[in-house]
Amino acid sequence: MEINSIKNFFQEKFSATATCYFSPGRINLIGEHIDYNGGCVLPGAIDKGILAAIRPNGAKIVRAWSVDLSDYVEFGLEETDKPEAGWARYIFGVCREMIKRGAKIGGFDTVFSGDVPLGAGLSSSAALESTYAFALNELFQAGIDQKELVLVGQKTEHNYCGVNCGIMDQFASLFGKAGYLIRLDCSTMEYEYTPFDPKGYRLVLLDSVTKHELVGSPYNDRRASCERAALAIAKRHPGVEFLGQATEAWLEEVRAEISEEDYLRALYAIQENVRLRETVEALKRGDYETVGRCMFETHRGMSQLYEVSTEELDFLNQIAADCGVTGSRIMGGGFGGCTLNLVKEERYEAFVETAVRQFRERYGKEPKVYPVVISDGARKIE
Ligand code: GLA
């Protein structure tokens, strides 16, 4: 939705003017399911996200419209005021997490709309959280540091939405920078902007339009498996807190002590962490063939070891391989959503055309195609 439309919608509903804020969704080049394993990830913000108009109302109540869902909710700011509507819980959670950090958040009126596709693994929920965390921090002069705002979003997921996610999505949404990926160390929150301009290649997402819903999903089970494996390793190698600090050899030592399922999940996480490092080095050399190979390996790991892929995503990945695409993999949490594809310019048109056609022939519906534009993070929009 355009800025003027959202302002007009606000005016219509609340007979007043408001300030607008935007936060984006994200992609992640590589390092999947690694944020909660204490390793590094390589996300970037995209040009799609959530746009909100907000105005403090001087009361103790939040009055919120979701434009896209045509839904209206009112809620107070006490812990017991948690709204029923799923979308409103994100906003409520952000308010509560900021209040827990000492912010004096008052009531406000708001409307929001998004163009980041829901359930595509592009982190529409982090975009929503980051929009409100960033905006309320400014509007109520809460003075919360930007890294702490990342945790506000993450804890909203944990405490109000049922997903034990890591920090990657919220970090990318708040810290994104046009033209740069973020090499983020999730155990320390240290980060570095890495220029990303793969000359001669394009990055494109193919949305399998299959459901991606992390709430109440096996996402939390994956995390629990990794934590159990890390704990087993720590008994022999004190000081290991996350799988990001462990090696495959250490995992082999404890193989008999953990379940086969936990072993497979941990094996993926340890290997993915190594691939991340290899990819970062390859990027420095401009070696996109290695980046692409790592992406295919990630897909295999996510599909066969971590088991978060779907038949549709495996199908899209296979088409990419058949079309000579440089790199392709399932992206984000999994269980549906998109593949991320690194494609040579000259193969781009043929690949997209083939993928759309073959997917339609097989599943009777078309995958959506989103070219990736690496963009800026959370901001006020004048
Ligand atoms: C979801 C979570 C992130 C991260 C990814 C997988 O997007 O919100 O924290 O774990 O899945 O990399």
Image: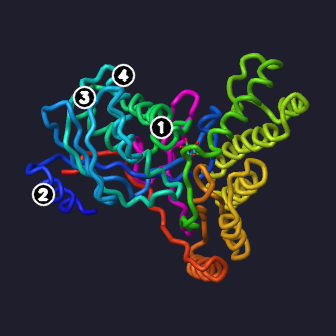
Q: CA distance from mark 3 to mark 1?
A: 19 Å
Provide the residue designation for mark 1: 157
Provide the residue designation for mark 4: 100
Give residue 155's position: percent from left, percent from top.
46, 31
**Cβ atoms under marks 2 and 4 closer than 8 Å:** no
Provide the residue designation for mark 3: 105
Q: Is mark 4 within 8 Å of ligand 1?
A: no
Q: Is residue 67 above or below residue 56?
A: below
Name the disc covering residue 12, or none: 2
Q: Residue at x 52, y 41 (%)?
A: 168
Give residue 214's position: percent from left, percent from top.
56, 47
Q: CA distance from mark 4 to mark 3?
A: 10 Å
Q: Amino acid at mark 4?
A: Lys
Residue 291, located in which quarter of the rendered image? bottom right
Q: Is mark 1 within 8 Å of ligand 1?
A: yes
Q: Residue at x 59, y 37 (%)?
A: 35
Neighbour class for label 3 at 10 Å: few (<14), some, many (≥20)?
A: some
